[in-house]
Image (cartoon, grey):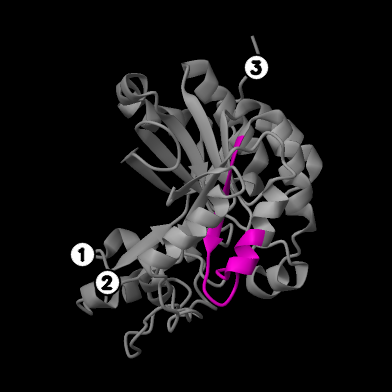
Amino acid sequence: METINYGAKGIVFDIQRFSIHDGPGIRTIIFLKGCPLRCRWCSNPESQKMKPELMYRSDQCIRCGSCFKVCKVGAINLDKEYIVDRDKCTSCGECVLVCPSSALLMKGKTMTVEEVIKEARKDSIQYYRSDGGITLSGGEALVQSEFAKELFKACKAQGWHTAIETEGYANEEVIRDVMPYVDLVMLDIKSVDPKKHVEFTGVDNKTILRNAKIIQEITNTVIRIPVIPEFNASREEITDIIKFVKTLPNVKKVHLLPYHRYGENKYKLLNREYEMKDTKELSDDYKSELKQIVESYGLECQIGG
């Protein structure tokens, strides 16, 4: 029997229970910190940095001053609308512990594989009843590849279905090390145009396209396309991506993930600017048209994940 390092540590920023998306059946989604991409439309900006981050909900703040009193580095200024000075904040979390109105929230917690499995086990009966399981998301879960691998191994030891949402931006060694423990990979292909990919995500797509070919040879793979206005939402762009997908012989299914603004408020909580605040969502008719384009290439397609 393969050895599992239950003491391996990772940084988790959320655990979502009873999910019916991001894999078959009822699932628990484990969100890991860290991402090498900086997608303009990112709906989980709190996931991007590896370290824990403080979020501030001004509408819940009662200006009691408890946070100011416990902050040892002077990172709280109650005279400002956004009270957290991020240049000074060390993410120690002391202010979160004393906040009576839950206006301060820490995103990111170090957990062991054993602790995550213990949490996931609370819903294990649902996995068996629904053919569900565990999905790793992020961020980019492969940034914490050793933790991800040990967590997947532990899930397999429990008999749970395993899945990952990934951008595939990792070295080949990581891909070949982790993917044998994954039953389903939901792989983002955002663009086949390298210049556009850099402009909108901050990284080149060469590694991602290379890894797509490797991943689909190892395990069941679904390609996901975030459909983003002004980036890749044209008929031509989607067609170009689908032509690449057709070079992946084991991929039969594509998910179109239309642009949404669900994560916009998180940028306010982090005191960051949301670059796509003026971007409009796609119409249902246009989404259906893009779906028909995908299906015209002989691929199964669904809108949403």
Residue at the spot of label 1: 100
Answer with mark 3 or mark 2, whichever residue precedes in sequence: 3
Q: Is residue 111 visible?
A: yes
Residue position marked by numbered label 2 in the rendering: 66
Q: Earlier in the sequence, mark 1 or mark 2?
A: 2
Type of amino acid at the residue the image marks with label 1: Pro
Looking at the rendered structure, the kind of residue marked 2 is Ser
Q: Which residue is mark 3?
A: 3
Query: Could you tell which of marks 1 and 3 lies nearer the N-terminus?
Result: 3
In the rendered image, residue 89, in percent from the top left (x then y), is placed at 49, 72
Foreground mark, 3 or 2, reads 3
Quadrant of the image for the N terminus? top right
Q: Secondary structure beneath disc 3?
A: loop
The answer for how far apart the CA atoms under marks 1 and 2 are is 8 Å
| Distance from the alpha carbon under mark 3 to that under mark 2 | 46 Å
Residues tagged 1 and 2 counted as in contact (Cβ below 8 A):
yes
Taking depth in this image into account, of 113 and 222 the one nearest to the observer is 222
Locate residue 56, reporting x and y percent: 35, 72
